[in-house]
Image (cartoon, grey):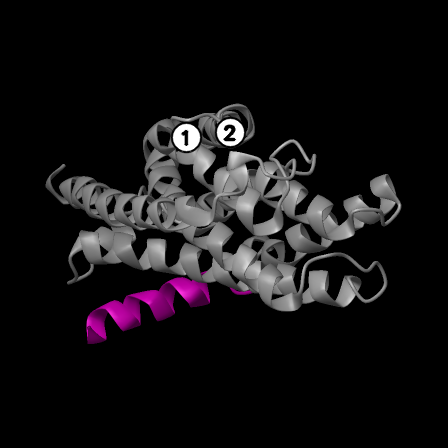
Amino acid sequence: MHHFTAVVRAEHLKVKRTFTRKLVYIAPLVTLMLCVVLMGGHFFQSGSFNWWYAMMLPGTLALLCIGVLQKDARKLRYRSILALPLSPSLTWLGKIAEVSRLFLVSSLFFWLILTAGSMVFPGTLSAITSLIACLVIFVTFLWQIPLWLYFVDRIGVFVTFILSMVGNVGLGIMLATSDKWWLVPFTIPGRLMCPIIQVLPNGLPVPEGDPLMDGSVILPGLLISVGLFVLLSFITAKAFEAKETR
């Protein structure tokens, strides 16, 4: 545990004074500014949530993964860290933990400025409901962190970014309201937001009495997301450990 804490602390220091660190705060600010400018403050809360998880967050999370991984990837293809007397899988898990930490800070910052903005542009969501929505989005996106880190390492930055946008913006929006949403993990954030903020992934309100308002999907969606996060973290850590033998 002591070694893992040291690895996470080292990863944290690597991103200090980098664009990756600034992106944590820039992305939420840009999201809310777009809602104010493009929507004139109307539907400020629901619009901000939709822009956040459907448009801004997929790109932001991919960029966070790219920023954390590229710090070492540029240095002789990880030779500087593979030479350390630590398990490569531990180093990989440290990177996952650091991206998760940055993502959590960004999510809480989004909630903070959304709550502050709601004083100017009142909405129907309470601060508690908004916080729950932010945390649910955080948990349901977590599984993508080990996935995008792995893809950045194996297939490169550009393709990873495109895949993130296609998966979340394409599949995530199109299939979120289908009966088989649970088969496509990208749909989980949008599906769970329907009963929480009562807005469809396309930005329209959920019709009153619609089955999409059923909150029973929230727990299964969270469990699937957490399970995928644990599974992908383990698989990708083992794959990164194999680099040591090359």
**Residue bearing mark 1:** 181
Q: Is residue 177 above or below residue 135?
A: above
Left or right: where 240 falls relative to 119: left
Residue 117 position by quadrant = bottom right
Q: Most prominent secondary structure in the magenta stretch? A: helix
Q: Is residue 27 above or below residue 11?
A: above
The residue closer to the viewer here, 9 or 42, is 42
Q: Residue at x 29, y 66 (%)?
A: 7
Kindly tell me whether residue 115 is visible in this rendering: yes
Q: Residue at x 35, y 59 (%)?
A: 97
Q: Residue at x 83, y 48 (%)?
A: 36
The percent coordinates of residue 83 (x first, y second) are 19, 55
Kindly tell me whether residue 17 is visible in this rendering: no
- State if disc 1 and disc 2 touch (CB < 8 Å): yes
The residue closer to the viewer here, 187 or 86, is 187
Which residue lies most toward the right here?
40
The percent coordinates of residue 69 (x first, y second) are 40, 47
**Residue bearing mark 2:** 177
Left or right: where 183 falls relative to 44: left
Whether the magenta-drawn stretch holds residue 56 is answered as: no
The residue closer to the viewer here, 45 or 55, is 45
The range drawn in magenta is 1-16
Q: Residue at x 38, y 29 (%)?
A: 184
Q: Label 1: state its secondary structure.
A: helix
Query: For the residue carrying disc 1, how many other residues have a C-alpha within 10 Å: few (<14), some (14-19), or many (20+)?
Result: some
Whether the magenta-drawn stretch holds residue 5 is answered as: yes
Left or right: where 82 falls relative to 245: right
Which amino acid, mark 1? Trp
Which amino acid, mark 2? Thr
